[in-house]
Image (spheres, helix red, strand yellow):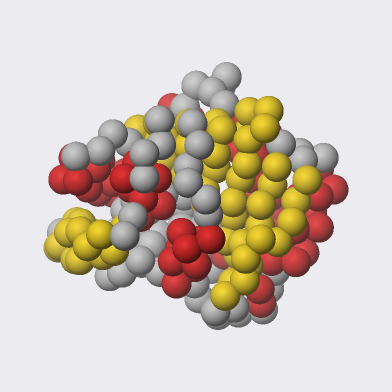
Amino acid sequence: MDDAPGDTLDVVTEDHYFTAQPASADERRTIRATLAGREVEVETAPGIFSPGHVDLGTQVLLRTVPEPRGRVLDIGCGWGPIALEAALRGASSVTAVDVNERALDLLRRNATRLGVAVDASLPDAVPADATFDTIWSNPPIRIGKDALHALLATWLPRLAPGGEAYLVVQKNLGADSLARWIAAQGWGAIEKVGSSKGFRVLRVSA
């Protein structure tokens, strides 16, 4: 997930991007956030994406998506705002993946705190034949174009027939070029379904 300004799909090396074991101190704290229309308390820590609040891109995504259908996947879950929202809104199952083990631990703890079921897993732990009816993601744009394309090529083909993926991407970080690339892969129809605060929400329909 990314809400930083910029103009290209360039690479940065922040601790939370593709870091299995963050170097920063694991100092847990509780914050308040609004998820699924209610105010909740969640646990966060340094070394993950947006530890102090629900980032703007994710807010735009969650205001745009319809009710979750069936099996939901959150790609790059962080401490879990997207996965928790899907679970609170009644998804039949929620799988969340991240390479950051601290983020996965936080999401598991937050799911327990809120009384919902979320399978928070390293990507390789998800069964190879698992498919999903819904994908919601604020993908890590700043890992770089090649890594981002590889990430999406791993998960978007896992959409079940009739499934839909919703991705939020900052316009000046390459939303339009990413949409063109996805369209060229033949995974399904793609369209822009929302735009706010410099972010675009893209829908891929399998």
Q: Position of residue 205 (x, y in %)?
A: 70, 42
Q: Image height check: is 7 above or below 14?
A: below
User: Within the image, what quadrant is residue 135 found in?
Assistant: top right
Q: Position of residue 18 (x, y in %)?
A: 47, 52
User: Within the image, what quadrant is residue 143 found in?
Assistant: bottom right
Look at the image and tell me whether residue 120 can be seen. Answer: no
Residue 73 falls left or right of residue 93: right
Residue ID at (22%, 62%):
39
Q: Position of residue 141 (x, y in %)?
A: 59, 62
Look at the image and tell me whether residue 145 can be seen. Answer: yes
Question: Number of callouts in the render?
Answer: 0
Residue ID at (31%, 45%):
88
Residue ID at (29%, 64%):
34
Q: Image height check: is 22 above or below 56?
A: above
Residue 13 falls left or right of residue 105: right
* Residue farthest to the right, as pictured: 184
Q: Position of residue 15 (x, y in %)?
A: 39, 62
Between 23 and 54, which is closer to the camera in this rendering?
54
